[in-house]
Amino acid sequence: MNLADARLCVMVGPEMEEHRLLEDSRAWLRAGADIVDFNPGARPAADALGLMRELRELCREEGALLVGCDCPHLVREAGADGLRVTDVMGTMGEARAAAGLGRLMGLTVVSGSQAVLGMALEADYLVMAVHPAEVWDIPPLRERMTIPFFAPSPDAETAAALMAAGVLRFWVPARAGAGEEITRELAAIARAMGREV
């Protein structure tokens, strides 16, 4: 899988229970996710590294990408495909160097000016952290978007409406205890994209 072909990302937050994480991630990948974005949160470093390594192997088996959120050293040590940072005002160059050159670099943005800054800082992709109805309300996006971006989509109906407006990529948040529900949401969005799952 390469970033250009990736259309659906599942965001795995720190509240996810370790014993469910791999099983749920496998189901999400098979339901259509192309990227697992793992945020280790406050997990002990050794536990987070172990989980990331297991997720990396799972993603490779399933032909998907693994991205770590705000954890450049874990990304490098685990051999993940990329890093997403959530602090647009932080130093992307330092984060990229810590994660390892040649890895994907994503940036979470909440405004048009942050999107423009992310492109200027040579992010490989953007994650829009706004309400789905606000995606095209960010003025520079329609005219100036030069890199892939992922819009939030809580369901297939929202995804279909955004696709009609020209959005190609989506992210779905994983919630603790909602593995099967998220699997159904991802599969419905993938089908709305014309994919067979």
Image (spheres, rainbow, N blue to C red):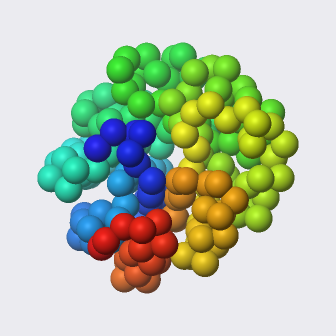
Identify the image quadrant of residue 111: top right
Give the tally of numbered discs.
Answer: 0
> Horizontally, is 191 left or right of 141 in the view?
left
Query: Which of the pair 183/160 is nearer the observer?
Result: 160
Q: From what the image shows, is residue 121 above or below residue 114?
A: above
The quadrant of the picture occupied by the C terminus is bottom left
Front-lying residue, 154 or 86: 154
Residue 73 makes an appearance in the image: no
Residue found 61% across the figure and 62% down from its top: 163
Query: Up-down: is 125 above or below 170?
Result: above
The residue under the point 65% across, 54% down is 166
Q: Is residue 179 left or right of residue 128?
A: left
Residue 129, compared with residue 80, is above or below; it is below
Residue 195 at x, y = what percent?
36, 67
* Position of residue 156 measured from the top left corner of the image (x, y, whole percent): 54, 76
Above or below residue 50? Residue 153 is: below
Q: Position of residue 4 (x, y in %)?
A: 42, 39
Q: Pinpoint residue 10: horizontal percent, then vertical percent.
A: 44, 60
Closest to the observer: 193 or 121?
193
Q: Is residue 163 visible?
A: yes
Which corner quadrant holds the N terminus? top left
- Residue pictured at 30% horizontal, 37% vertical: 80
Q: Residue at x 75, y 43 (%)?
A: 142
